[in-house]
Image (tube, rainbow, N blue to C red):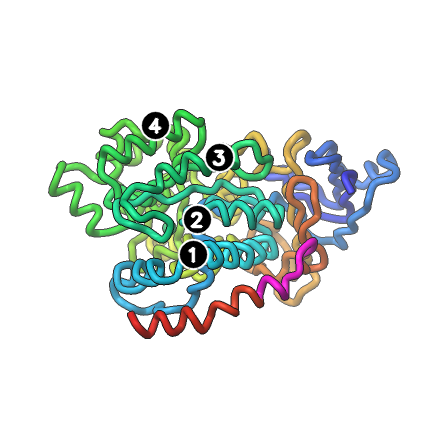
Amino acid sequence: MDKILIKNVTILTMNKAKEIIENGVVVISGKKIIDIGDSSLESKYKGFFIIDGNGGILMPGMVNCHSHVSMVAFRSLADDEADRLKKYILPLEKKLVDKDLVYNGARYGICEMLLSGVTTFCDMYYYEDEVARAASRLGIRAILGETIVNFPSPDSKEPYEGLAYCKEFIQNWHKNDLITPAVAPHAPYTNDSEHLIKAYNLSQKYKVPLTMHVAEMDYEYKKYKEEYNMTPVQYLDSLGILDKNFIGAHLVLVDDKDLDILEEREVGISHNIGANSKGAKGVAPAVKMYKRGMKIGLGTDGPMSGNTLDIMTQMPLVGKIHKLFNSDRTLLPAKDIVEMATIGGARALNMEHLIGTIEIGKRADLVILETESVNMQPIYDYYSTIVYSANPSNVDTVIVNGRIVVKSKKILHVDFNDIRRSLLDMKDKILSATKEI
Ligand SMILES: [Zn+2]
């Protein structure tokens, strides 16, 4: 089905003028949007498969700029423990993470994303080939980075073996239409400067993105202050590795000078407020970043950190936490938050030429939210409805690259029960390993 016509929807284009078309029509041919307009368009396109949006809201697919999707296998473990990364996450990963866990976790987590209207995500983990396999099978767009760390990891016996894995991974996937392979040094504090530069050079050589955690941890900030009298951002800039291809996750502990650097270098930013607030990491200066016109999108982080993989639960948190933190209810109007969730995320990932808005020529990555559920009415402002009234259960239809992947709130083309079974089959093993830690 490569010719689709969507009708009876309110289209939030998220284009520059933020046009909204009521009772609108969007026409898709192959992977692309070929026409947009009012209901009169329907008579022009005969023989197209019709999706009747039933008065719903059609918006661009949402972009999750930072995740570790396979960690859904560990979701809800040790949520309230101190120093959880070192006490739980790293030991659990060492014991349990293998190809099967990464593949089964990725399949399940990608279903969660698709069912909630995420059509593109940026991921970082081990055995990233398995994530790519799952993403490709399920039909979601993704930037996927193999993790590079200075210690032996689930898929490498020696420190920094991730670099060699990464090179092969890029070669395996760089021709895939939906998958963009990436280089993912975990963080400044888990890579020395020599290997950060090697990772950067690898990303330059193959012209792929580089994504990493930056300025998230107190000890990270302290380390670079003590050793170099620099912030983590200034340290990375001194290595010459910050540029347009860099996608930084978190960027919580940043000052105005850091913002100047990040803006100048055109670094993409994943703002992960759900994970940052749950982990008590602090509030990133996202309002300043957005007002400067920086490349800021939203991310969930891994499901151990933020517990969900959907962007709809991030949006109200972004609004509420920044308003509360700054004692100003006028900050970040809902329209700006929907922008971050869509075209903002696309800009952060350097994909704004392909996705993020509903415009002729762009890829058909689209979401229909139904407006019949009790929480969705009345609607006086579409953006407020999306940010503050809606939740992932209102996502009715999802299209990625012109292919319908969710219809009537059900995932298509795969057996979700089988995917769930594969994830839950690992539960006993995970639970007993947790008890031994
Ligand atoms: Zn993360």
Give the answer, above or below, for where 328 lies relative to 377.
Answer: above
Nearer to us in this view, 326 or 85: 85
Nearer to us in this view, 372 or 221: 221
Q: CA distance from mark 3 to mark 2?
A: 27 Å
Which residue position holds label 3?
A: 347
Instruction: Give percent across and percent down for residue 282.
Output: 29, 54
**Please, what is the three-letter code of the amino acid marked with disc 2?**
Tyr
Q: Residues within 10 Å of mark 4 (few under 14, many from 20)?
A: some
Which residue position holds label 4?
A: 201
Which residue position holds label 1?
A: 98
Q: CA distance from mark 1 to mark 3?
A: 33 Å
Mark nearest the camera among 1 and 3 is 1
Give the answer, above or below, for where 34 lies relative to 326.
Answer: above
Q: Which mark is residue 324?
A: none
Which residue position holds label 2?
A: 127
Q: Are marks 3 and 4 in contact (CB under 8 Å)?
A: no
**Please, what is the three-letter code of the amino acid marked with disc 4?**
Asn
- Which mark sits nearer the N-terminus, 1 or 2? 1
**Residue 414 belongs to the span the image colors magenta:** yes
